[in-house]
Image (cartoon, helix red, strand yellow):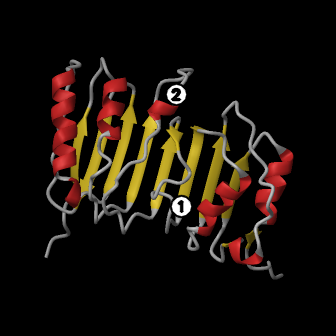
Amino acid sequence: MPAPHRRKAQFLSSVIRVQIILHAPEASVDFQEVVGNTARVAAFINFASREAYRWRSMDFRIEYDKTLDLLRNSATLSVPLLETLSIGYMRPRRELSVDDRINMFGGRADRLRHVKLYDLVISLSSQLFSGLETLTIAGARVSPGPSTNEIVDVLRRCPELCAFELDYSGEEEIRTSDAIPSEAEEAHLPLLTSFNVTLTNATALNRVISSIRVPACSE
């Protein structure tokens, strides 16, 4: 029995610079657009949304505000097979407002294990950050500025986390929480092998590190 083909749906535009790659177990489908056309972008996003139940991997590279709006409006999607999600907003030096925050998928994403977010305004309370194995938030603006306890809470909700990267580049100061997490509120990460956190506040960084529990290294 032949192995299932990877289903690939791709949209490229030299004008509005949108790339969307979708993987599912079925046969391969390629879709390309050379000249930018907002209506065609919307149609493709609608297709991706309508077929969301089948996707195992979603990779978005966005350089267009209206496409970001379409993704933001996807909050009710149910993606029961989705395992990997990557979203990058590829517009350097553009200041994003709180209104640009994305909390994707108010529907089910029970199998989601790998998330990468680049250059987005996001909320650490998003249900995306639960039960993950790898999480990367790079170049993102967490709005409002996160507290150390909020960061620890993300880790606590992902007990099987293997790799975590947070590069907080927001102008707002990281808030060091007044209350130190109790032992029950600490993040226990027995599988963690990679931890890369960039924070501007050394006190906050120390608080986060001290709230994580990993197995002792043996010689």
Relative to 186, does residue 195 appear above or below in the rendering? above
* Residue most extreme to the front: 178
Q: Position of residue 86 (x, y in %)?
A: 42, 47
Q: Amino acid at mark 1?
A: Thr
145 shown above or below 135:
above
Residue 58 placement (x, y as % from top left)? 33, 50
Is 49 situated left or right of 86 in this image?
left
Which residue is rendered at x = 53% and y = 61% of the image? 134
Task: Point out the tag, 2 or 1, that comes first from the N-terminus.
Answer: 2
Q: Quadrant of the C terminus?
A: bottom right
Q: Look at the picture and state if 210 lies above or below 90.
A: below
Q: Residue at x 21, y 45 (%)?
A: 48
Q: Residues within 10 Å of mark 1 (few under 14, many from 20)?
A: many
Q: Residue 97: which numbered mark, if any?
A: 2
Three-letter code for the amino acid on which mark 2 is drawn: Ser
Is 57 left, or right, of 6 in this rendering? right
The secondary structure type at the circle numbered 1 is strand
Q: Nearer the viewer, residue 3 or 35?
A: 35
Q: To which residue does mark 1 refer?
A: 134
Side (left or right) of 128 relative to 95: left
* Vertical side of 171 occupied by 71: above or below: below
Tell me residue 208's x, y (percent). 76, 58
User: Which label is found at residue 65?
Assistant: none
| Quadrant assignment, res 27 | bottom left
Residue 13 position, x and y percent, is 27, 24
Q: Quadrant of residue 82?
A: bottom left
Disc 2 vs disc 1: which is toward the camera? 2
Mark 2, secondary structure of its residue: loop
Frontmost residue, 72 versus 158 = 72
